[in-house]
Amino acid sequence: MDWQIIHQRAEVIDRIRTFFQKENFLEVQTPLLAPALIPESYLEVFETGLKNKTGKSQKAYLTPSPELWHKKLLAAGSGNIFEITKAFRNTDIGGSLHNPEFTILEWYRTKADYTDTMKDCENLIRFLVSPQKTLTYQDKSLELNQPFERLTVAEAFEKYAQATPDNDFEINYVKYVEPKLGQKKPTLIYDYPAQFAPLAKPNADGLTKQRFELYLFGIEIADAYTELTDAAEQRQQFEKEQAERRKLGRIAHPQDENFLKALESGLPECSGVALGIDRLVMILANQKNIHDVTLFPGADIFKNLC
Amino acid sequence: MIKVVNIVKGTFLKWRGEPVVVAEKEFYSPGKGSAVIRLKLKNLQNGKVIKEVLKTTENIEEIQVLHQKVQFMYKTKDNFVFMNPFTYEQVEISTELVGDLEVYIKEGEDYTVALWEGKPVELQVPKKMSFKVIKSEETVKGNTVTGATKPVTLDNNAVVPVPLFVKEGDEISLNTETGEYAGRKN
């Protein structure tokens, strides 16, 4: 237990709050327990049951992100919001970058698209590292005073994998592309193939979606979209994700119809970002493993699974 | 063929025609698309470590590895020499291949050697082995938060933390996978 790191972690979270308060974002707290979720095929959920005092029970799920609540708040006129909370992703135990419950920062900016939240990421990172102008991790450094590198997924595949994103996406991405991102400058990699962003607005060509990720030293720190506001299109995407979840044998959870109702009632044009605070602290505290910046990591308390 | 999901550290495989052993295996979810498996494979012939990324649905060819029981005889400059107690055949295993397991090599002790095409590719030591305490400090006021241990030197020159009641001359058991104290013998 390195108390210095835990103190540094608390300081980082405090500074994140200060950043968003200065930007006049409203801090919200939303439930971690939900009766239905947004169907996403790439992750697995935690299922539990909420009981009342007469013994009646209803299935409940731990939220993989606060998105399902935030979009309802945005549709109800919240304006710019942010939340620092826990996100739960089942099976994400093992490895140096994952913990089954992790601390997530999620923020939404209205009257904005993903190019605006890309700038938020640049400003946030610079603010957290200031007064230093360079971010150092292990034996590498990134200069922060110039704009971050902006690269599309297609450009990154051509440059690093000598391939297109159409074939063997995951293998090429993990083996050749990801290790190269955020190594000379922080990288904002954007415009993902359409199937990888069911909640994002499509680009005019229909082949890619307005999604970006922020990488520092080859590590994914944040994930963002220009949010999809079309309720009918979102419902179609939900169906695709549910089908994929069934195919993968994932837990069948009810889909959040109130989420779709919120979109039907009108979601303002907005862009949101989900950032992994533990991974960010890992980099700022110069640690190699998420367990070193997390109190009671899953790998330590659930020893049977490791 | 073995499913990639079933591979563990120590599995012997054929990768691109070469014999390898799995040094590390990890599931990795890139957050887009399906999870993949990241492997570090050590080439048995030249010791080179390669990194590979595979889909969870893939299969890889295993290589046939024979396990033989052997006893340790003596050490030369570059090799540890073992003997098959049934055939009296000698098996030489390089100090490189023995690596960190060197502290567990004792005369007359039984080991298992894995052979591929007649060549040793792995040495397995018993899960628990006993060693004699040759040096121990007098009662040391321990930090009770960490469980009150003291370091002792064993007859293999390893220094291991043990409970305070262990004395010089005692035989103790070590868990060879973790190198930790696993009980007293006498």
Image (cartoon, coloured by chain):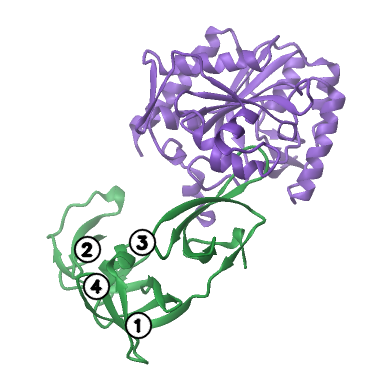
Q: Amino acid at mark 3?
A: Thr
Q: Residue at x 21, y 52 (%)?
A: B142
Q: Chain of mark 2?
A: B
Q: Which chain is purple?
A: A
Q: CA distance from mark 3 to mark 1?
A: 23 Å
Residue A49 drawn above or below residue B154 = above
Q: Which residue is mark 2?
A: B158
Q: Position of residue B73 (x, y in %)?
A: 25, 82
Sequence-first tag of 2 and 1: 1
Q: Chain of mark 1?
A: B
Q: Which residue is mark 4?
A: B131
Determine whether the residue tagged by mark 2 lies in a helix, strand or loop: loop
Label 2 Cα crowd, 10 Å radius (few <14 / some 14-19 / many 20+): some
Q: Mark 4 touching mark 1, by CB under 8 A?
A: no
Residue B98 drawn above or below residue A181 = below
Sequence-first tag of 4 and 3: 4
Q: Which residue is mark 3?
A: B178
In the rendered image of the structure, the colour used to display chain B is: green
Which quadrant holds residue B7?
bottom right
Same chain, labels 4 and 1: yes
Q: Position of residue A267 (x, y in %)?
A: 78, 16
Q: Which residue is mark 1?
A: B70
Sequence-first tag of 3 and 2: 2
